[in-house]
Every structure is written in structure tokens, then in C-alpha cells.
Amino acid sequence: MKTIRLTLMAVLWLISNQAWSESADNRTVIWLTDTEKTALLSEMRQFLSASHQILSAALTEDADAVEAAARPMGVKLMKSTPDALKTKLPKGFGELGSRTHLGFEEIANEASGMGDTNVILKQLAKLQTNCIACHAHYQFKVTP
């Protein structure tokens, strides 16, 4: 019985290892300097943190906290991206980024207006499709 179990584990390991090694990353490579890559990844972590804060605040119907989390990720942050970096980014990546910033702005506007948490949660779900699309299509690599 022990031999069968060990054999089965070995076969499963070989199959999964082979599948893992054969899987290719076909996402579009965006070549950046180390500093640029660090800056973009930092912004993405801010998006993730803000999304969590928005979700938590919406679930407790705290519209002020929703706005406080969303507003800094909106147009203001979008305008702070250096032009030199913007020119390096593929058009599709830039469009996803703009839609994401504008999505945060829309959430902040809803929170400061009607403050309907159902609308806010729907907006957040829609916004996160940008994150999913971006991570599915692009990868960053540092220019050698």
C-alpha cells in the first residue's frame, strides 16, 4: 500500500512538474527600468489596498471612508505619472490604467454624493476587471 501511494505521488509530481515547465508566459512584456517597475508595482499595490478599504467601508456603509480610500487613486494619481513613463507603456496598458483611475474617481464621487453602497460595490467589481485584464495581458521586465 505504501509503495502504491509513493508511486502515485511520484507520477503526480512528474505530471505537474512537466505541465508547469511547459507553460509559457505569453503576456506582452513591458520593458522598464528598475525604478519604473518599482513605481508601477507600488501603484498597483496601492490600488489593491484601496480596493480592500473601499470594500470594507462599503460593507459597513461608511461613505466617508469609501471616498477617503478612492479619491487619492483617481485623477490626481493618474496625473502624477511621469510623461516619460507614459510614452513607454503600450496603448492598451495606458487605457486600462486610465479606466482604473477614473473608476476610483467614480467610486469617490458616488461616495460623496448619494453614497449608495450597492452602487459602490458594483463600481468596485467593474473596476477590478481592469486589474484582472491588465495582469492577464502584461508583465514587467527590467531592461538589461
Image: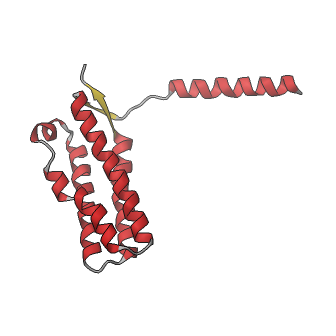
Front residue of this view, candidates 73 and 98 = 73
Q: Is residue 137 left or right of residue 6?
A: left
Q: Residue furthest right?
A: 1
**Percent from the top left, x then y, of residue 107?**
29, 67
**Picture residue at 45% right of the left edge, 70% below the top:** 59
Give the residue at the far bottom of this rendering: 114
Furthest residue in direction left, as rendered: 83
Q: Is residue 37 above or below residue 57?
A: above
Using residue 41 as the reference point, say whether residue 25 is left or right of it: right
Which residue sits at x=69%, y=28%?
12
Q: Count how many numbered circles sit on residues in the image.
A: 0
Residue shown at 21% from the left, 53% from the top: 98
Question: Does residue 82 lie above or below 143 as drawn?
Answer: below
Depth order, front residue of 24/56 = 56
Query: Residue 69's quadrant in the figure?
Result: bottom left
Horizontal and vertical percent position of residue 112: 25, 75
Up-down relation of residue 125 to residue 111 (above or below)? above
Residue 6 percent coordinates (x, y): 79, 24
Residue placed furthest toward the top: 144
Q: Image quadrant of residue 25?
A: top left
Tell me the quadrant of the picture where the N terminus can be found: top right
Q: Where is residue 110 shown, x and y percent of the image?
A: 28, 73
Q: Nearer the viewer, residue 65 or 6?
A: 65
Q: Residue at x 35, y 50 (%)?
A: 131
Quarter of the image with the C terminus in it: top left
Q: Is residue 130 above or below residue 63?
A: above
| Res 103 → quadrant | bottom left
